[in-house]
Amino acid sequence: MHEIALSPQEFELFRSYIYERVGIALSPQKTTLIKGRLNKRLHALGLSSFGAYYDYLVADTSGEELATFVSAISTNVTSFFRESAQWKWLESYMPQLVAAKTTKKLRIWSAGCSSGEEPYTILMFLQKMLHDFEAWDIKILATDISHKVLKHAMQGVYEPKQVEGLPASIIEGAFEKKLNAQGHYQISQALRQKVLFRHFNLVTDPFILNKPFDMIFCRNVMIYFDEPTRHDLIGRFTSILPKGAPLFLGSSESLTSHRESLKLLGSSIYQRL
């Protein structure tokens, strides 16, 4: 399979389009990455040039090819209970949150949920922390730009290697029995019903939300954004976080703005002031 060349002019077309549509800022240093990761896609589509692929990308009004492009140029690494320091902090925060509640209702947003490990981890964590978990009205909004990963997340099926390492008590409480000869696990229906999966573009889709969230997770998403895009997104997040509520970012992410409305607590955890 021969390698298809990517010209500077074609790179600029992609750079402008992707920035406008999803906020990802591509530097010229990403030319080799794009060319390498998308050559296979061009061959699969029977296209002979990146110019033809750009036309194909723009013409796809479903947004699926855009999601395919974004997935190809970004790194989708996730796992259950990722960022252990954040979960440890959350253990100490939960009694305070529960004590402040006037109703047994929790609303949490997992923004950029990928294949579902994050929203399901949130529920596993709450199962452990809330002795009357079943009495709580809990809803997790889990959003991503990719229909493909959302479909995977909704099914909640994971390979043994993705589940190994979890305590036996969590596996017993959160998963159905193994599904097949390969030993795949599925998140229990009771937990899956507590997650609302939705396709959502954090940069262009409006935040149509009437009530605030108790916490927001947006981890390892903004590393692909430039500072103006990050600034705008954080401003939108803070507008739907009540005073004292936490915002969780990825361990490699930090904020240089909104210091008047968010306080760093450590481990990329910010609290709404």
Image (cartoon, rainbow, N blue to C red):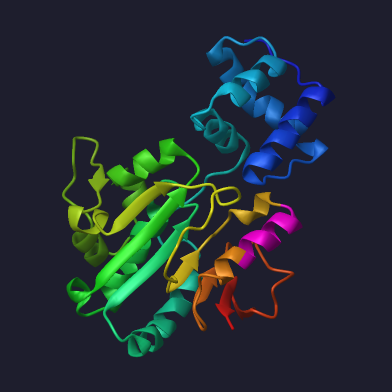
Tell me what residue is drawn at x 70 percent, y 18 percent: 50
Horizontal placement of 45 versus 254: left or right?
left
Residue 22 on image: x %, y %:
62, 43
Horizontal placement of 55 versus 98: left or right?
right
233 inside magenta stretch = yes
Relative to 187, does residue 29 appear above or below in the rendering?
above
Tell me what residue is drawn at x 40 percent, y 80 percent: 91
Judging depth in this view, the residue of 134 and 204 nearest the camera is 204
Q: How many marks?
A: 0
Horizontal placement of 19 versus 156: left or right?
right
Q: State the image quarter where residue 98 is shown.
A: bottom left
218 inside magenta stretch = no
Judging depth in this view, the residue of 133 and 231 nearest the camera is 231
Residue 257 on image: x %, y %:
73, 70
Q: State the image quarter where residue 133 is shown.
A: bottom left
Tell me what residue is drawn at x 47 percent, y 61 percent: 82
Name the quadrant of the C terminus.
bottom right
Magenta extent: 226-235
Determine the residue located farthest toward the left in the rendered image: 177
Query: What secondary structure prevails in the magenta region?
Result: helix
Relative to 61, does residue 45 appear above or below in the rendering?
above
Residue 251 in view, yes or no: no
Residue 246 on image: x %, y %:
51, 75
Q: State the image quarter where residue 199 is shown.
A: top left
Name the quadrant of the N terminus.
top right
Residue 44 on image: x %, y %:
53, 15
